[in-house]
Amino acid sequence: MKQKKLSTILKNHEKWLRNGSGKKADLSNADLSYMDLKNANLRGACLSNTNLSSANLSNADLSNADLSNARLECAILRNADLRDANLKKTSLSGADLNNAELGRADLTHADLSCTSLRRTNFKDANLSGADLSWVSCWQDVKGLTVIAVQVDTTRRNNQITYIKELDIWTTGCFQGTLDELKASIEKTHGDNVKLRKRYYRVIDFILREAKE
């Protein structure tokens, strides 16, 4: 889509939001990859199945927007407002969500792999089924209690992360319950008593911290 056409759609959407005289933005199935949408007001817009990979959406208002099945790989979402947005089955792999607001956003089965979540506010967000494994940064995440501990091994990715409110454990490409994590450890490190005990000590530490 040409930037000029997109600008017209955004202007009409602004009018629709303001007094209903314009037209609600329907950008479903559009290719908006690499587009500059900084500060764009897309509140309530339809963006389902839209390709927004590598798009600049910093400071954009995407609250109440339908982003289901959208592609947001490597998109810049710094300071973006995603409250009440529908992000079901959305791919956010590699996206930058620094300072983003996700209050009550629905991320059911969303792919958050390699996503930067620094200072992201997840208050009341629905993350059921979201792929939280390989999330690159949990620093200062708001709305979730995240306990991450590095395990002393020779593996490249050996951090165990527990998201308390979701009762989800992740490490490497693993994501699941505590019982599933223990089963995975037994399967992968069953013949290495020293390493297996190290993992369990980390798990016990995380459980103690989660009770605080």
Image: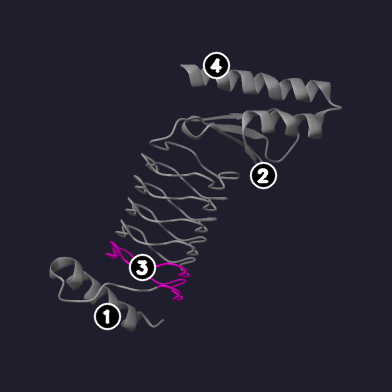
In this rendered view, identify the residue nearer to me: 140 or 24.
Answer: 24
**Magenta run includes residue 50:** yes
Q: Residue at x 67, y 44 (%)?
A: 173
Numbered disc in front, either 3 or 1: 3
Pointer 4 or 1: first along the chain: 1
Compared across the picture, whether 200 is left or right of 205 comes to right
The secondary structure type at the circle numbered 2 is loop
Tag 3: amino acid: Cys
Decide: is 126 above or below 150.
below
Mark pair 3, 1: CA separation = 16 Å
Question: Of discs 4 and 3, which sits in the foreground?
Answer: 3
Q: Which residue is mark 1?
A: 8
**In the picture, residue 149 is in which quadrant?**
top right
Q: Position of residue 1 (x, y in %)?
A: 41, 81
What residue sits right under mark 4 in the picture? 208
Between discs 2 and 4, the one toward the N terminus: 2
Q: On the picture, is 69 further left or further right than 125?
A: right
Q: Which mark is residue 46?
A: 3
Residue 97, percent from left and from top: 43, 51
Q: Amino acid at mark 4?
A: Arg
Give me the disc on residue 66: none
* Gap between marks 2 and 1 measured at Cα: 42 Å
Q: Is residue 17 visible?
A: yes
Count residues near mark 4 (Cα–Cα under 10 Å), then give few for <14, some for 14-19, many for 20+: few
Q: CA distance from mark 4 to mark 1?
A: 55 Å
Is residue 153 visible in the rendered structure shown here?
no
Is residue 151 shown left or right of residue 104? right
